[in-house]
Structure formats: structure tokens, C-alpha cells
Image: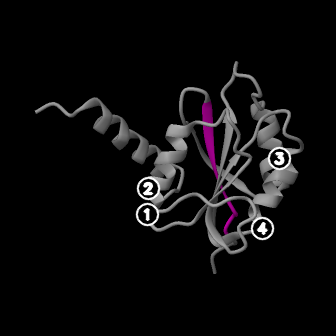
Amino acid sequence: MPVPVAAANAEALRGLLTKLGIKPGMTVQEIGDDSDCDETLREAVAAVAGSALVDWDYEDVVDAVLLWHRDDDGDLVDALVDAIGPLTEQGVIVLLTPKPGREGHVPADEIADAVPTAGLQATSTVSAGPDWQGTRLVTPRGPRR
């Protein structure tokens, strides 16, 4: 029996969000959202997490941050440091940037320079929609003893 297209797309989106570290029961904060953000992705994150996304002024800890960042949004290191603030110890930042060739694209070398400067480590980068790529960022773990 064939799988309906909408169901297949929803399953693919759930798989993508799992790769980015979004899991059921998470509190997910969204920073930098604007009219150009991918609504399908936003809705899928809320559906997987099981609750609405919280705004940048949320006053408790969060399990994940969706950080939408464009080339003209200011300093990426500053944005990443601000995003780290409310994260739990095991939290994840999903850095969402426009794909190459799209307005606001952030060059890969800029991301590569900013991530370790902010004290983070990139674990994967995936296509997060027609116009956005997502990079999963975590705090590096200390040496095992």
C-alpha cells in the first residue's frame, strides 16, 4: 500500500529534526524568527517537541534553541553566545541559515569561525527546507575520566 505524500514528507521531516536533536518533550526557544522563516519547519519542531515554541524572552531554561540567522543580522558569535544562555547542560542549538544563493546566506567559513569562538561544536549540517540549512551545535564535552 503506497504511503501518502504528506505522511512521507512528515516522516522525513521528523527524521531531519531527530538529526538536529529535536525530541519529544523538549522546550524549544526560537530566536531570530521573521516572515522569511520556514513555517513548515517551525510547525514540525513544535509538533515533535509536543508544545509551542517559546520566544526569546522566555525566562526559564530550554532544551533547544532554533536560531534563525542571516548575513545582515549582526555578529554571529554574539548571537550564538546569547543562545547558549538559557540552554540546559545537554541542550542543543539549531543554527538555521539561508542556503547558498539565497538572500542573507551566511558563508560556511564564517560559521566555522564563529562556532568554536562561541564555545560550541558543530555536529551536523542538513538541508532544513527549500531555503534553509540547519547546523546542530552542542557544547563540547570534557575529557572522559
Residue at mark 4: 85
Residues at circles 1 and 2 in contact by the CB criterion of under 8 Å = yes
User: What's the residue at 66%, 27% (across, down)?
Assistant: 99
Residue at mark 1: 24
User: In the rendered structure, which amino acid carries the disc numbered 3?
Assistant: Ala
**Tag 1, which secondary structure?**
loop
**Tag 4, which secondary structure?**
loop
Residue at mark 2: 48
Q: What whole-number distance in Å separates the C-alpha atoms at marks 3 and 2?
A: 29 Å
Q: Which quarter of the figure is the N terminus placed in?
A: top left
Q: Earlier in the sequence, mark 4 or mark 1?
A: 1
Q: Earlier in the sequence, mark 4 or mark 3?
A: 4
Quarter holding residue 36: top right
Q: Is residue 7 left or right of residue 17?
A: left
Q: Which quarter of the figure is the C terminus placed in?
A: bottom right
User: What's the residue at 61%, 27% (across, down)?
Assistant: 131
What secondary structure predominates along the stretch shown in magenta?
strand
Quarter holding residue 6: top left
Residue at mark 3: 114
Q: What whole-number distance in Å separates the C-alpha atoms at marks 2 and 4?
A: 23 Å
User: In the rendered structure, which amino acid carries the disc numbered 1?
Assistant: Pro
Single out the mark in the foreground, 3 or 1: 1
Q: What whole-number distance in Å separates the C-alpha atoms at marks 4 and 1?
A: 22 Å
Q: Earlier in the sequence, mark 3 or mark 1?
A: 1
Give the residues in magenta. Answer: 132-141
User: What's the residue at 51%, 56% (across, down)?
Assistant: 22
